[in-house]
Structures are given as C-alpha cells and as structure tokens.
C-alpha cells in the first residue's frame, strides 16, 4: 500500500451476500430524513431485513412520519459493530432509498412477529410481550426500498493494511477516490498520486 492510500476506501465495498448478512444480523439501524427546513435528522431503530428491503415501525404522529410523507427520500445506515452473530461482517452499509408506509393488518402481523423474534430471539414470553407493545392503533410500518448502497468492509481494509488482500478482492474505485480526491489534493498543493 502506497503512502496516503489509507484515504482510498471505496475499494473495500461489500458484496451483495455481505450486505444481506449485515442487514439480517445487525440489531439496529439509523433512519435519516430531511426536515421541512432542510435539516438532516436520524433516529436509531430496530429493524427487519426482508425481500431486500428495510422494515421498521414508529407512531404515525412522529415528526419523521410527516417528513417522510412529504419527501420519501431517506437513508438508512447499519453497522456490524453491535451484532452478536459471528456471521455478521465487520464494517457498515448506508443505503439511499425511498420510504413507503403500510398500515394494513397483513403487513402488521408478519412484521410485528418478525421484529419480536429478532428483538427477543430466545424468549417466547419476550416475543409475545414485545408484539403486544407494537400492536397499537397509532403505529405505522415503514418499508425502505434501496436505490443505492455505500458500503465499507472493515475486514478487507485490515487485510489490505496487513498486505494479505488480493487485488481481485477489491471493489472498483469510486469517483470520490479517483477524480474528486485528485482535485482536492491539487487544491491543497499535495501533488498527484
């Protein structure tokens, strides 16, 4: 690894299989949206990953519900740091997507059960209790459909620093690490690489 290559991180992307494992095993995500006056805001949520989409819930009167109904462009970030499952990759993924609300009984039934099992995997009593908390008339379910992923595989980065990552394991360098980095280095008088 050449000097300053630590600034190049887009080459450590996840595969689709790694994204699926992270999203399946990570316990929480951060949902982000924009307020009416343009401020970015985020809140931590327990979530379910199903059919390539993120599902979460909150009460319909929350500010985030009104904001997402106004502009359904959202982001969701998930880190593998809090996962207890050994198959969960280290690193993080952020998705840019669109949020869609559901309030039908069929969706509530499968989602509340799936979230209860995820939150309390070893206790049927805990699952039943959490389900009863979720099952309230003000609750909505948000489905986030991914449109773009930004990922970072911490294991690939560590292996590259150790000199054990092969070139064919790296993902293509993104514009931020090719054109934009070169322009910023030039602006700062650091020279080309």
Image (spheres, rainbow, N blue to C red):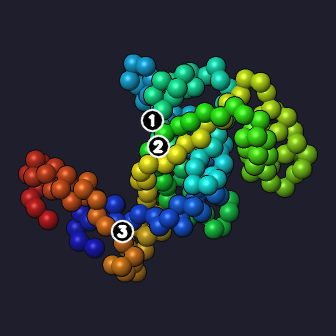
Mark 2 lies on a secondary structure that is strand
- Residue furthest to the right in view is 125
Mark 3 lies on a secondary structure that is loop
Q: Callout 3: 10 Å neighbours few (<14), some, many (20+)?
A: some
Tell me, yes or no, whether the two marked residues, 3 and 1, touch with CB atoms within 8 Å. Answer: no
Residue drawn at (73%, 23%), measured in percent from left and top? 138
Q: Which residue is mark 3?
A: 171
Residue 65 vs 190, above or below: the answer is above
Residue 162: % across, % down = 39, 76
Q: Which residue is mark 1?
A: 73
User: Number of numbered discs present?
Assistant: 3
Residue 175: % across, % down = 24, 56
Q: Which residue is mark 2?
A: 97
- The residues bearing labels 3 and 1 have C-alpha atoms spaced at a distance of 26 Å
Q: Quadrant of residue 161?
A: bottom left
- The residues bearing labels 3 and 2 have C-alpha atoms spaced at a distance of 22 Å
Residue 24: % across, % down = 64, 57
């Amino acid at each position: 690894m050449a000097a300053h290559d630590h600034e190049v991180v887009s080459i450590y992307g996840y595969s689709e299989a790694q994204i699926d494992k992270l999203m399946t095993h990570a316990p929480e995500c951060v949902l982000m949206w924009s307020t009416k006056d343009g401020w970015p805001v985020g809140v931590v949520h327990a979530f379910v990953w199903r059919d390539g989409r993120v599902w979460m819930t909150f009460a319909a009167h929350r500010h985030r519900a009104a904001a997402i109904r106004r502009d359904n462009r959202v982001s969701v970030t998930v880190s593998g740091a809090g996962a207890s499952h050994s198959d969960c990759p280290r690193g993080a993924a952020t998705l840019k997507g669109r949020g869609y609300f559901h309030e039908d009984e069929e969706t509530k039934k499968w989602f509340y059960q799936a979230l209860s099992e995820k939150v309390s995997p070893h206790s049927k009593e805990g699952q039943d209790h959490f389900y009863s908390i979720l099952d309230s008339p003000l609750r909505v379910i948000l489905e986030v459909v991914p449109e773009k992923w930004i990922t970072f595989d911490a294991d690939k980065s560590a292996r590259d620093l150790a000199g054990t990552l092969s070139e064919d394991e790296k993902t293509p360098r993104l514009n931020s690490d090719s054109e934009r980095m070169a322009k910023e280095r030039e602006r700062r008088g650091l020279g080309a690489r």
